[in-house]
């Protein structure tokens, strides 16, 4: 085999050994968040190189969905469903949607927190509530300024 190919295989073995050591040191969910954050930095440089605003939007959308799915798994569906629900409320309610959107967002966040208390009381796992807490503020500000 060529020497460069052997070096590539050695690098891959070293990479897998280091990842396995990291898995022993850190919980899986925290490691996924760290990998997603670190991998988003070089991927952001590619965003700068894209020629068109439409391509950048679709690249950002695809990359955001993939990274969220990598970190949170199937729980991301709950966030996307909440986005759609808020959009529907704002579309139909128009001027007076601020209170309704805030109430529904806080209610769903509270329901999710109660669910987590029942399922994983005292647990330290990383879940979708981290996104939901920030999203509640965004939804409220968006609806009141709409």
Image (cartoon, rainbow, N blue to C red):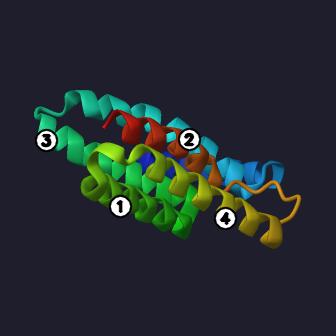
Where does label 4 land, which residue?
Answer: 111
Question: Residue 27 location, x and y as percent?
Answer: 77, 54
Alpha-carbon distance for marks 1 and 2?
Answer: 16 Å
Asked whether residue 74 appears in the rendered view, the answer is yes
Where does label 3 land, which residue?
Answer: 54
**Which mark is first along the chain, 3 or 1?**
3
Q: Nearer the viewer, residue 102 or 116?
A: 102
Residue 29, placed above or below residue 50: below
Find numbered disc 3 in the image and state the secondary structure of the residue it sits on.
helix
Labels 2 and 3 touching (C-beta < 8 A):
no
Residue at image location 41% in from the left, 33% down from the top: 42
**Which mark is first along the chain, 2 or 1?**
1
Find numbered disc 1 in the image and state the secondary structure of the residue it sits on.
helix
**Which mark is first along the chain, 1 or 4?**
1
Where does label 1 land, which residue?
Answer: 84
Alpha-carbon distance for marks 2 and 3?
Answer: 26 Å
Where does label 2 land, which residue?
Answer: 134
Alpha-carbon distance for marks 4 and 1?
Answer: 18 Å
Labels 4 and 2 touching (C-beta < 8 A):
no
Question: Residue 61 location, x and y as percent?
Answer: 30, 49
**Which mark is first along the chain, 2 or 4?**
4
Alpha-carbon distance for marks 1 and 3?
Answer: 21 Å
**Which mark is first along the chain, 3 or 4?**
3
Residue at image location 67% in from the left, 58% down from the top: 110
Label 1: how many Cα within 10 Å (few below 14, some 14–19, many 20+): few
Residue at image location 51% in from the left, 48% down from the top: 102
């Amino acid at each position: 085999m060529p020497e460069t190919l052997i070096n590539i295989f050695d690098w891959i073995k070293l990479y897998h050994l280091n990842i396995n050591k990291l898995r022993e040191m850190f919980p899986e969910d925290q490691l996924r968040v760290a990998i997603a954050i670190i991998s988003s930095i070089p991927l952001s440089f590619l965003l700068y190189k894209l020629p068109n605003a439409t391509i950048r939007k679709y690249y950002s959308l695809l990359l955001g969905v993939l990274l969220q799915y990598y970190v949170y798994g199937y729980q991301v569906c709950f966030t996307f469903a909440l986005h759609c629900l808020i959009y529907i409320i704002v579309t139909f309610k128009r001027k007076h949607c601020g209170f309704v959107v805030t109430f529904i967002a806080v209610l769903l966040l509270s329901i999710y927190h109660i669910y987590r208390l029942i399922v994983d009381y005292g647990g330290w796992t990383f879940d979708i509530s981290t996104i939901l807490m920030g999203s509640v503020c965004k939804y409220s500000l968006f609806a009141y300024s709409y």
